[in-house]
Image: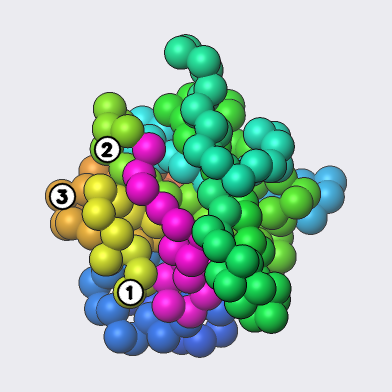
C-alpha cells in the first residue's frame, strides 16, 4: 500500500506499546498510528499528522494538556475572556511537596485548555513536556464545559501505566490521549462508547480531508504496517 495512512487498532494488548496493561481494558483503548513517507525534521509527530489529530480532538472536545507556555504558579489562574485558559496546579502543603520531591514527581504543573486546533497542536511540540519521550498527556472533556477539575496527582497518574484506570475515575472527563512508544503512536481511552465512535468518525473524516487513507487493523497488522512505513 502506498500513500499516507492513519491507522487505528481496537484490540491491542501488547506491552510493547508502552501504554501499560491494555489487556485489562478490552474495548476501552484505541491505538492510532500513521505512515506518510516522511518524518518530522526533529523527533516527534509529523506536522501533517499533528494537524489531523489536533483538528480531530478540538472538533469533539475541550483539550486540556501540559504546557510550558503559561508559566508556573501555585494557584489557579484563568486567562482573560476569549483567550485559552491556563491553570497552574500545585501540591498543597509542605508535606505534599516533600512527598512529590522524594517520589521524583513534579510538585506543580501548568495546563492549557483549548478548542483551537492550532493551539492544541502544541501538545505534540512542547519541549518541556516532550511527546516523543512520553512526557505529555491531554484530557478530553465536553466542549462547552469548564476546565476539568484535576490535581497534580491526577496528571502524574495519567502519564503512567495506571492512566486508563485513573481516566475512568475522573469526573467530567470524556477521554484521555497520551503518547505510546517513542511518541510514534497515540493511545486514546474513551469513557463512553458514543464519544469513542464520534472521535474515530471525526478522525476518519479529517484524515480523508488531508489526503490520508484511514485503516482499521488488527494488532499484528497495525504493528507490521507501522514497521513497514
The circle drawn on residue 194 is: 3
Cα separation between marks 3 and 1: 19 Å
Q: Are marks 1 and 2 in contact (CB under 8 Å)?
A: no
Write down the residue under mark 1.
165
Confirm whether the magenta stretch covers residue 159: yes
In 3D space, how far apart are the residues under numbered discs 1 and 2 (Cα atoms)?
20 Å
SS state under label 2: loop
Q: Secondary structure at mark 1?
A: helix
Q: Is residue 22 above or below residue 107?
A: below
Marked residue nearer the N-terminal end (1 or 2): 2
Mark before the other along the chain sequence, 3 or 1: 1
Region of the chain picked out in magenta, as a range: 147-163
113 on left or right of 205: right
Q: Is residue 169 visible?
A: yes
Corner quadrant of residue 154: bottom left
**Badge 2, how many Cα within 10 Å: few under 14, some, many 20+?**
some
Amino acid at each position: 500500500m502506498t500513500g499516507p495512512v492513519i491507522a487505528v487498532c481496537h484490540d491491542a494488548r501488547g506491552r510493547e506499546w508502552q501504554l501499560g496493561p491494555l489487556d485489562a481494558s478490552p474495548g476501552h483503548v484505541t491505538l492510532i498510528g500513521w505512515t506518510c513517507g516522511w518524518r518530522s525534521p526533529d523527533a516527534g509527530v509529523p506536522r501533517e499528522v499533528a494537524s489531523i489529530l489536533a483538528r480531530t480532538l478540538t472538533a469533539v472536545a475541550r483539550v486540556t494538556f501540559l504546557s510550558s507556555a503559561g508559566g508556573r504558579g501555585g494557584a489557579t489562574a484563568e486567562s482573560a475572556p476569549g483567550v485559552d485558559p491556563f491553570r497552574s496546579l500545585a501540591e498543597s502543603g509542605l508535606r505534599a511537596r516533600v512527598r512529590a520531591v522524594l517520589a521524583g514527581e513534579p510538585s506543580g504543573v501548568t495546563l492549557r485548555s483549548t478548542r483551537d486546533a492550532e493551539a492544541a497542536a502544541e501538545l505534540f511540540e512542547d519541549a518541556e513536556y516532550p511527546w516523543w519521550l512520553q512526557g505529555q498527556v491531554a484530557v478530553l472533556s465536553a466542549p462547552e464545559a469548564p476546565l476539568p477539575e484535576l490535581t497534580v496527582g491526577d496528571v502524574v497518574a495519567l502519564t503512567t501505566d495506571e492512566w486508563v484506570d485513573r481516566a475512568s475515575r475522573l469526573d467530567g472527563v470524556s477521554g484521555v490521549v497520551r503518547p505510546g512508544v517513542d511518541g510514534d503512536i497515540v493511545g486514546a481511552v474513551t469513557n463512553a462508547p458514543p464519544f469513542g465512535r464520534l472521535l474515530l468518525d471525526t478522525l476518519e473524516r479529517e484524515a480523508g480531508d488531508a489526503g490520508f487513507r484511514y485503516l482499521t487493523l488488527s494488532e499484528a497488522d497495525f504493528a507490521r504496517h507501522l514497521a513497514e512505513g
